[in-house]
Image: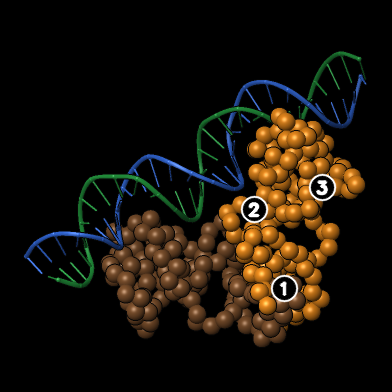
Chain colours: A orange, B brown, C blue, D green
Amino acid sequence: MQRLEEKYLEKGLRMTTARRAILQALQASDDHPDALTLHVRAQAIDPTLAQATVYRTMRLLEEIGLVEKHDFGNGRARYEEAGKDQHDHLINLATGEILEFHDEALEALKVQIADRLGFDLKDHRVELYGVPKVK
Amino acid sequence: MQRLEEKYLEKGLRMTTARRAILQALQASDDHPDALTLHVRAQAIDPTLAQATVYRTMRLLEEIGLVEKHDFGNGRARYEEAGKDQHDHLINLATGEILEFHDEALEALKVQIADRLGFDLKDHRVELYGVPKVK
DNA sequence: TTGAGAATGCAACTGATTATCATTAGCTTT
DNA sequence: AAAGCTAATGATAATCAGTTGCATTCTCAA
């Protein structure tokens, strides 16, 4: 329930009204909101919250590893809580909706390919863009 | 040698000094230049070339399918000649260098995963970020 | 060679994100 | 609980990649 807020406190950082509102808004989101969307949602909790603070806080949260930042190519960065599970994304081109999926074979293949090229895999990005099958 | 320029002409579009310079600069590039880099390179051929024209032309070239636009997450779009071969990218985090690789199993897996989720794969992005193995 | 329409250069303008800075608010110490 | 130090905030200006408006220049077909 309060997982995110607890994790945040464990980092020993100052808890403020603004950050609590953002963390709560983020926790309540099951999609991949961008900074502006998050601003709107968090303002429902703290109406005085400024955009600049959202941007600053998201950067902080990313730095301390609490959130993951994605760029699905629409110009705006999108966020999601980090470490919930390991997954990649499939973007529905017809609706813009983002689906998460996990595939063991794919995970293994990524590591294997990087290794073959002489690299230790540090990060990766797999995004599939598709349209619903008509069948 | 003139492949790109020829392909461009086949599209029946107007050939101008600016576009010729950009196409030549692109052809001579074996990396993944961004618009600003391309501007510098093309200015060596046409010193009066403006940035706006590079942006406009890259958009055009992408639309007609002559170049592929990538976003490796540094804020600037990067370009490469399209259709040379099918490949994905591995970014060397230590140097920023971009390697290209091709893996049949990976290609097949992408299609398979999208299919399993009920989608026809239209596009995809696989980027591996790694550091050289010390071994 | 000429003229219509497309392309260009320049500069102003976006839209997302970051920096500045004066003010406010957490947290620690008394 | 009050005080003080410092980090965080809000408001706004600045930045950065990319786009657009517009007057001028250039392509290319007739």
Distance between the alpha carbons at the discs numbered 1 and 2: 26 Å
- Percent of width and height locating residue B40: 39, 62
- Percent of width and height locating residue B70: 55, 66
- Percent of width and height locating residue A30: 79, 53
Quadrant of the image occupied by residue B35: bottom left
Quadrant of the image occupied by residue C24: top right
Residue drawn at point x = 49 percent, y = 68 percent: B79
The answer to whether marks 2 and 3 sit on the same chain is: yes
* Image vertical order of residue C24 relative to residue C14, above or below: above
Residue drawn at point x = 75 percent, y = 54 percent: A31
What label does residue B75 carry, if any? none
* Image vertical order of residue B122 relative to residue A56, above or below: below
Q: Amino acid at mark 2?
A: Ala
Residue that sits furthest to the bottom in the current view: B104
* Image vertical order of residue B114 relative to residue D1, above or below: below
What label does residue A77 carry, if any? 2
- Percent of width and height locating residue D22: 29, 45
Q: Amino acid at mark 3?
A: Gln
